[in-house]
Image (spheres, rainbow, N blue to C red):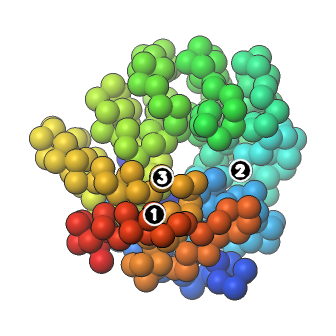
Amino acid sequence: MFSGLYTAVVTPFKDGKLDEASLRRILKHVLDSGSDGIVPSGTTGENPTLSEREKDILISVTKEMCEEEGAHVIAGAGTNSTYKTIKMINEAEKFGIDGVLVITPYYNKPTQDGLLLHFKEIAAETNLPIMMYNVPSRTGVNMTADTVIELSEEKNIVSLKEAGGDLIQFSSIVDGTKPGFTVLSGEDALTLPSLAVGGEGVVSVASNVAPGFMSDMLDAWDDGNIEEALTIHRKLLPLFKALFRETSPSPVKAAMEMMGLCSAEVRLPLAPVREETKKALEKALRDLELL
């Protein structure tokens, strides 16, 4: 159901508060450059630090602007509590969103049986389309291909953001899930390799700063112009590396400040990036003529 380029949008802050003006500027920048959808209030949006009011503003503004462009809104709505996740989804549903992104529970380290029960319970409590999110480096647990394949049989579990870094697992999920179930890369640097094994897009951090390049790479692949897609991938590699030198979203926000899109401000326990990371980001942006 979900395919193409989805931007995992940052949450801009100014003096500790949500900066709605910068949010609108970022959304316009991304949507004008070809994003098929926006993911607000996710990990890149510093979800754990946001108040309920801030989440409401993020989702409502994103929905308003995406509706004008015909783009999807998939709201981040996952926690490490099944019942809090359901409550969060029910709150987000009132904004008329197109789906929810639900991360595997972090810290708890559920077994695969626990993951099955978690997602099946959530699916039973909402009619919204669900994109699951597997990111072991953040959560401490890997959702296996067999688990994803079983969950793909649920009528409203329609997609997976896969950020496990294992293309064999990625390929096994693509091969084993039901027709119509889509698997998107959750790692910018693996977007092109994942397309080669059947992926259908990316939920991207890099597209906060380089949405045009990301969109062009996906379009080139879809048009069968593999050499062009590979050329763009190679151009973007230094940016991908710079954006993940430190914990995201601190680097991408630093890059966005350089571009005049928003402040680099992040909320504790995240910290501003170090000077060497700033230099790597600036070089990558200049090489791409984004500065």
Mark 2 Cα within 10 Å, few/some/many (few <14, many 20+)? many
- Can you identify the residue that label 3 sits on? 244
Circle 3 sits in a helix, a strand or a loop, which is it?
Answer: loop
Lower position in the chain sequence, tag 3 or tag 2: 2
- Can you identify the residue that label 1 sits on? 277
- Can you identify the residue that label 2 sits on? 77
Lower position in the chain sequence, tag 3 or tag 1: 3
Q: Position of residue 87 (x, y in %)?
A: 84, 50
Q: Depth check: 18 or 125 in front?
A: 18
Q: In the rendered structure, which amino acid carries the disc numbered 2?
A: Ala
Q: Disc 2 to disc 1, how far (Cα)?
A: 30 Å
Locate residue 74 relative to residue 207 in the image: left or right.
Answer: right
Query: Which label was assigned to residue 86?
Result: none
Q: Position of residue 103 (x, y in %)?
A: 67, 40
Asked if one can make out residue 64 in the rendered structure from this viewpoint, the answer is no
Circle 2 sits in a helix, a strand or a loop, which is it?
Answer: loop
